[in-house]
Amino acid sequence: MLPRKREGQGDVVEGETENNNNSNTIKYVSVTSPVKRHRISDTAAADSTVNDDTFAIRNSSGSSSVVEPAMAPGDSNHNDIDEDLHSRQLAVYGRETMRRLFASNVLVSGMQGLGAEIAKNLILAGVKSVTLHDEGVVELWDLSSNFVFSEDDVGKNRALASVQKLQELNNAVVISTLTTKLTKEQLSNFQAVVFTDISLEKAIEFNDYCHNHQPPISFIKSEVRGLFGTVFCDFGPEFTVFDVDGEEPHTGIIASISNDNPALVSCVDDERLEFQDGDLVVFSEVHGMTELNDGKPRKIKSARPYSFTLEEDTTAFGTYVKGGIVTQVKQPKMLNFKPLREALKEPGDFLLSDFAKFDRPLLLHIAFQALDKFISDFGRFPVAGSEEDAQKLASIAANINECLGEGKVEDINPKLLRQFAFGAKAVLNPMAAMFGGIVGQEVVKACSGKFHPLFQFFYFDSVESLPAESLDPSDFKPLNSRYDAQISVFGSKLQKKLEDAKVFMVGSGALGCEFLKNLALMGVSCGSQGKLTITDDDVIEKSNLSRQFLFRDWNIGQAKSTVAASAAASINPRLKIEALQNRVGPETEGVFNDTFWEKLTVVINALDNVNARLYVDQRCLYFQKPLLESGTLGAKCNTQMVIPHLTENYGASRDPPEKQAPMCTVHSFPHNIDHCLTWARSEFEGLLEKTPAEVNAYLSNPVEYASSMKNAGDAQAKDNLERVLECLDREKCETFQDCITWARLRFEDYFVNRVKQLIFTFPEEAATSTGAPFWSAPKRFPHPLQFSAADTSHLNFIIAASILRAETFGISVPDWVKNPKMLSEAVDKVIVPDFQPREGVKIETDEKAASLSTASVDDAAVINELLLKLELCRNNLPSGFRMKPISFEKDDDTNYHMDLIAGLANMRARNYSIPEVDKLKAKFIAGRIIPAIATSTAMATGLVCLELYKVLDGAHKVEDYRNTFANLALPLFSMAEPVPPKVMKHRDMSWTVWDRWILKDNPTLRELIQWLKDKGLNAYSISYGSCLLFNSMFPRHKERLDKKVVDVAREIAKAELPPYRSHLDVVVACEDDDDNDIDIPQVSIYYG
C-alpha cells in the first residue's frame, strides 16, 4: 500500500518507486529543375456592417432578409478558438494568426467554380464573415466546376444558391450575399476582397479604391479559363509580413566562441545549423562571455553547417566558458505593392511554376489582357472550336504585344493562343480546386500577415492535359449536359473515358474529400461502365471538420468512407460509388483480390502514412496500374505520378528516416522540449496503458503468464514483473486519497529523487574518460524541484495524475479535487520519504544503447521470487479484479491525458532549465499531430486531377506528366517531369521494375530453370516469399526439380493459395554466363 499521514502521527512507511508510426504524409519527389530540391518540416479591421449573429440574404431588388444561423455548440464567442476543431490548423498558423482570421471580413465576387472553392477554404479556415457576390444565375454549364450547385438550382442567383451548403461547413462564420451591382464604397466593409469574374476596367477601378483606402484593403483578382489560370495580388502600398515562411526559428547549441573581430561561433555537431548569411540571432545562457546574453539581435555571416561568424568585436568580452543557445530572430518584412494599373504595364518578376515554360508567364500576361478585350469588343467569350474566334484573339494579342516595345514577346505562339481561346469560357473543376487553394491562402496572408504573399502576378497552364490526338471542332459542341464546360475543353471522347473509368481511391480523409468532390464534378465513374470504389477504416472525429469538408458535426463517429460517398453522390447523383471500411494491406487481399485490381483503370492514393502508400505502390506495380500520389504537410504539398512503364514507382525513392534522439538523451540528458515530451509520452503509456495491460495479462492467466516470464528470463521480463507487483502491492490504490499519494510520490520520484541521483552520480564538475567536462553541450546540468502546493503547475500535475490513476483502478473521482484548498490539504497528508542518493547506480550514457534495462546473472532467480510475491498479492485481490488500461487520446481536452503529458514534460523541462510549452504546443509534439490546412489539400488534389485527364486519355508521353512540390507559405511551385524507371538489359532484352515475366502451363522447377536458360540466364536460387524452394548449392534440392513449382511451394513453403488466385510469384536469382548477377523481374507461375 502507499504511505500516507495518519491523524496525529508522523511515522513514515517507506515506499519505493516506460511509436506511433504516423509518418509525414508528404513525400518529396525528385524533380529535374533548376530549383533546389526542397525536403520536407495586426489586423486593421474596418468596422463591419455584417452582424456577428446573422447573415443577410439580399435579393436582386435590393431588399434583404435576415436569417438566424444555426449555431454549433461552442460557437457563441467566435474569438474563443475551438482547439478540438482547429488543432491541425493551429499547428500551421498559431493562435495569433487564427485570432486575426476570426476578426476578418472577406468579399468573394463571382460564384462560379473558382469562387465557390475560395469561399469553401475561407469558411473552413474560420474567418469572421464571407460575403458572396454574384449578379448572374446558375446555368447547367456551372455544374462542371461548382460543388454547391445542383440541377435544381439552375435559374437561381448563384450567390443565393450557394449560401446554405457553404454555411454547413462552419456555423461560426457569418455568410451573407450581395446580388446587385457592386459599388466601390461597399468594399470598405472588408479587410480583403477577391474577384474571380470581373473586367479589367472594373478591376482597375476597384483596385485603385482598395489601394488608396485607409487602411488599404487587400485586393486579389483571379481567373481560371479552361486550362489557364492567373492570380494578381495587391495588399497595399506598405504591407507588413510578420512571418515570411511559418517555420520555427532555427536554433543551435554553442560549443565555443572566439575573442576575435569578427568572432567565430562553433556549435555542437548534434544537428546541422539552418542559418543563412544575413540572419539575425540572439544568444542566451552563455557562460563566461555573458555580454552576448543581452538579448540584442546580431547579424551573422559565413554560415556553415556547424559554425558561423558573428559581425561583432568580442576581443574585449569575457572568455567563453561553456553553454549557450543561439536562436534565429525572424524579422518582419515590408512589401510595397503596385496597383493593378501600374503592374499591368510593369509586371516585374513573375512567380514561376514550371521551368520548362520559362517564357510562358509573359505570353499569358498578354493572353489574359487579349481575352478581356475580346469580351469587351464582342460581348461574349470565344466559341470552343471556332478557328475564327481563335484568330481574332491571336490578332488582339499580337497588337498588345507590339505596344510593349522592347519588352515584347518574340514568339506569340498561335497554337497556345488557339488552345486558350477554345477553352476560355470553361471553368474546370481541377483548375478551380488548385487556384481556390492558392487564392484562399493569399486571403489568409492578407488578413493575418502570416506567410509571404504572392508578389504580384502568377500565371499557370496545363495544356499537356489536353488529349494527345487532335480533335475535330464538332467534338467540343455542348451536349446540354452538366459536363458541357469540360467537353468544350477536352471533347466528348475524353468525357466518355472519364465516365467509364474504374477508379480505386484509398482513403477518404482530407485529401479524399477533395478528390471525391473533384471526381464527381468531372463525371469520373458516372457512366454506365464506370465505378468508383473508396475505402477507409477510420471514423469521423471533430478535428476532421476543419478541412474534411464533406463531413458535418452530426457525422462524428460515423464511417468516413460511407459519409463521404453519400456526400459525393449528392454533388453528382450519377456517380457510381461503393464505400468500403477495409484497410488496404496483405490481410485484405481476399477483398481486394486479383480480379478487383485487374479491372481497375487507375488508383488514387489519399493516405496519411508511408507504409500504406508503399503497399498500394507495390500492388500498382504488380498489376501495372497508374497510381496518382499526393501528400500535404501544413502549407506544403506534393504530387507524384506513377505511370506504368513511363515513370519510376513511389517506392523507388524515399526520404531519409527522421532522426530519433538517443534513449539516454531522452531519459537522462534532455536538451530541448521535444526530448521532454517524448519522455512524457513514454511514461504516460508505461504507467497508464502498458502496466495495467500487463497486470490484466497476469490476472487473466497467471500460470501461462508466469511460464512466459520464466522462459524469457531476461531483464525486460524482470522489469515487467516489478511493475505489475508495484501496481498490486506497494502502489495499489483503493481510495482517491491513495491516488493523490501516488501522484505526489511520482512527482518526488521524477523531478526530485532521480535528479538528485543523477547529479550525485555525475556532479557538476565531473569529467569524461578523456578529461573533458561531462556536463558540456549539448548536456544541461539539472536541478531538483521543490514541491509547492502554491505552484499551480505542481497542483495541476497532481490533479491529472491522480484522476488518471483512479481511472485505471476504477475509483470514482470526488468533486473536491478541483478545489485548490481541499486538494492542497489532501496532498499535505502525504508522507514523502527522505531520499539519499546511492553509490554505484548505473545511469546509461551510451547514445547507441537501445534499452535502459540492465541484464544481471541472477535475473532468473529474481523472476522466481517476484512471481511468488505476485501469487500472494493475487490471492488478496477481490474476485474478477482487473485494471483499466488508458490509451492516449490527444483530441479530447476533457480527459486529462494532455494535462498529464504537458505536466510531466514541463516539470522535466524546469529541471533542466528548458523553456516550457503550453498544452496546445505539447499536444502538437507529443500527439505527433500532422499540421494540415484546407488550402494546400485543395491545391494538391487539383493538380492530381489535371494529371488524371492525361492518364485516362491514355496516349501521353512521360514528358507530358508533371510531379509537383509546392509551398504556399513562400509561395513556391516546382513542377517537373517524373523520373523514368531504371532500365535493366541483358542480351537483346530490356526490362524495368514494371515488368513481370509470366510462365504458364503449370511448369516444374526444371522447366522454369530451362525457360530462363533459353534466355541466357542461369538460375541458382528460387524462392517463394521468405522460403527457399530451390538452391543449386544444396544437393537434396535437386530431388525437387521434376516437381511442379506450385506443389513445391505448397509442400515446402506451406503456401495457402486462395481459390480466387490461379498463379504464384517466385523470385529467381540468376547469373549470366560470365557469373555476373542479373536482377530479373518477378516470375509469375500460372497453374490454374
Image (cartoon, rainbow, N blue to C red):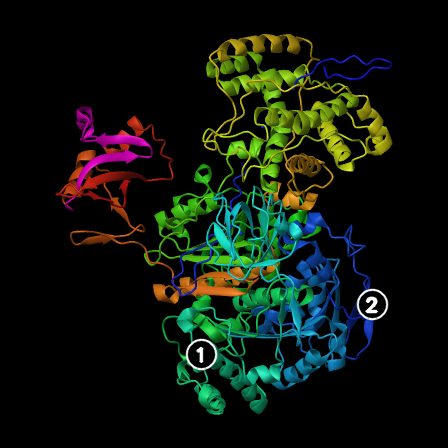
Amino acid type for the residue under numbered disc 2: Val
Say which residue appears at 49% left-offset and 59% top-offset.
Answer: 525
Viewer-closest of 79 and 990: 79
Q: Secondary structure at mark 2?
A: strand
- First in residue order: circle 2 vs circle 1: 2
Q: Which residues are magenta?
A: 1015-1043
The residue singled out by tag 1 in the image is: 419
Would you identify the image quadrant in which residue 799 lies?
Answer: top right
The residue singled out by tag 2 in the image is: 66
Please say whether residue 801 is one of the residues in the magenta stretch. Answer: no
Viewer-closest of 68 and 252: 252
Image position, residue 605 (x, y; %): 48, 52
Residue 479 in the image: above or below residue 689? below
- Quadrant that contains the C terminus: top left
Viewer-closest of 11 and 307: 307
Image position, residue 977 (x, y; %): 38, 63
Residue 391 visible in rendering = no
